[in-house]
Image: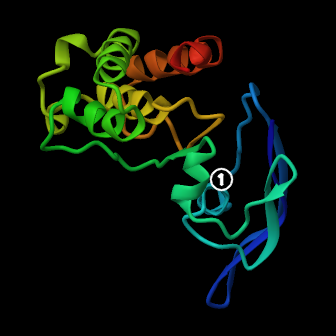
Amino acid sequence: MDFSAQKLCYRSGQKQIVQEVSLKIVSGESVALLGPNGAGKTSTFLLMSGLIVPSQGDIFLNDQNVTRWPLYRKARLGIRYLPQESSVFRDLSVENNLKIILERVYTATKDQKFYLELLLNDFRLTSQRHSLGGVLSGGERRRLEIARALIGNPKFLLLDEPFAGIDPRSIEDVQELIRTLKKKISEYL
């Protein structure tokens, strides 16, 4: 399975934000978009995920053109986008932050419980399961966000600035977590 962009362009008013970006990601690969602030990395993620529509260019999942598909439709096909800004529900517990997604993806209660425990354990969030999202450290919050993004077995996970807003020790934690994601992804089927 592959996910690709061909000559993506995006304009906002008179300003060219993304200009002819082409890339191809094959399932199982880790690919990084590198560049200075303002280079269009986040905009490229927004385009590929379906949050904004390109001015020009095409986005493909395998051979199917998904350029104009909205975020929810791409998500159903296994494309997940995790923004730089926190997406944790601050007034919900860690457990409920996971349950709210698990209940939408898995209809059987036993599956919901199984994946809840698996995610809490694998992402070292068991001791925080009853803590509100708003009191988590930056590293804990990012681990929770990544755990949530993995629910439903995504084929592609677009992580925007995965280390933003977290302390150096937590950065190492998240780096290790990202390194092991490819190995563990099959456990979340």
Q: What is the quadrant of the N terminus in the image?
A: top right
Q: What is the quadrant of the C terminus in the image?
A: top right
Q: Report helix, strand or loop for mark 1.
A: loop
Tell me which residue sits at (21%, 26%) in the image.
Answer: 95
Q: Residue furthest front?
A: 108
In this rendering, the answer to whether 162 lies above or below 15 is: above
Rendering coords of residue 46 (x, y %): 59, 60
Q: Is residue 83 left or right of residue 185?
A: left
The amino acid type of the residue labelled 1 equals: Pro
Rendering coords of residue 21 (x, y %): 82, 60
Residue at label 1? 36
Q: Is residue 22 left or right of residue 100?
A: right
Quarter of the figure with residue 109: top left
Quarter of the figure with residue 101: top left
157 or 13: nearer the eye? 157
Rendering coords of residue 108 (x, y %): 34, 26
Q: Residue furthest bottom?
A: 14
104 or 156: nearer the eye? 104
> Callout 1: 10 Å neighbours few (<14), some, many (20+)?
few
Tell me which residue sits at (31%, 17%) in the image.
Answer: 110
Rendering coords of residue 135 (x, y %): 14, 33
Tell me which residue sits at (49%, 30%) in the image.
Answer: 150
In this rendering, the answer to whether 52 lies above or below 25 is: below
